[in-house]
Amino acid sequence: MFELQGVSHAYDEAEVLHVDAWQAAQGEHWLLLGPSGSGKTTLLHALAGILRPAAGTVTVAGQDLGALGAQLLDRFRGQHIGIVLQRLHLIPSLDVAHNLMLAQYLAGLPQDRQRVDEVLAGLDLADKGSAKPHELSFGQAQRVAIARAVVNRPQLLLADEPTSNLDDARCLQALELLQAQATACNATLLIATHDQRIKSRVAQHYDLGARA
């Protein structure tokens, strides 16, 4: 579903990421492991098309991301890739439903309120469609961010340290939500983490620290 070949990136001439080769199949669930500074977020951004690596090829759903111009890349990301960042980046002036509908609009897809309501209901947020982000608890806001990431039925779902600031119970809940939503879309799931609590709950691991 995704494949990386010879991918590397540097900041100020210091290499922060190097992956010789790695591929994952559709529907697989992976953890991206490594200590702080090992390049986990950089690699997620490369897979999302947010960052173009200095070298190498990043292919998602059969598409070489480096071959797309900025506008086509934005459209491809919106239609095929969902991402939950450490900062949730919900639009504060929009209610929850319109945050999700904006994701549909930016992907060039029809604004489908029925799909929005379906996703919110599946995350126990059916009564929060008209709420503004500041009216949500942190856990609710996190679930809205997951809903936004999956509303367009992505083939690849990425999450950056989604459990790092959560207690044990909420950590497990967040992981189960991501896994359930990925399974519902048959999406490949990749979670970047250094949280030791979830290592045993996802079978496949790629450790950047071990490849440093």
Image (spheres, helix red, strand yellow):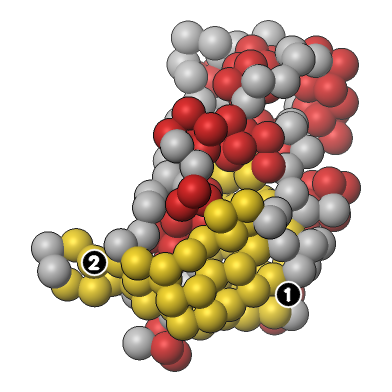
Residue lying at 74% horizontally and 32% vertically, measured from the top left:
152
Quarter of the image where one finds residue 70: top left
The residue indicated by pointer 2 is: 10
The picture places residue 25, in percent across and down from the top left corner, at: 76, 69
Which quadrant of the view contains residue 118? Answer: top right
Helix, strand or loop status at disc 1: helix
Residue 60 seen anywhere in this rendered image of the structure: yes
- Amino acid carrying mark 1 in the image: Arg
**Along the line of sight, the residue nearer the viewer: 49 or 36:** 49
Mark number displayed over residue 201: 1
Is the residue 93 above or below the residue 75 in the image? Answer: above
The foreground one among 65 and 111 is: 65
- How far separated are the C-alphas under marks 2 and 1? 32 Å
Quarter of image, res 80 = top right
Would residue 18 be found to the left or right of residue 48 on screen? left
Furthest toward the left, the residue is 12
| Amino acid beneath label 2 | Ala
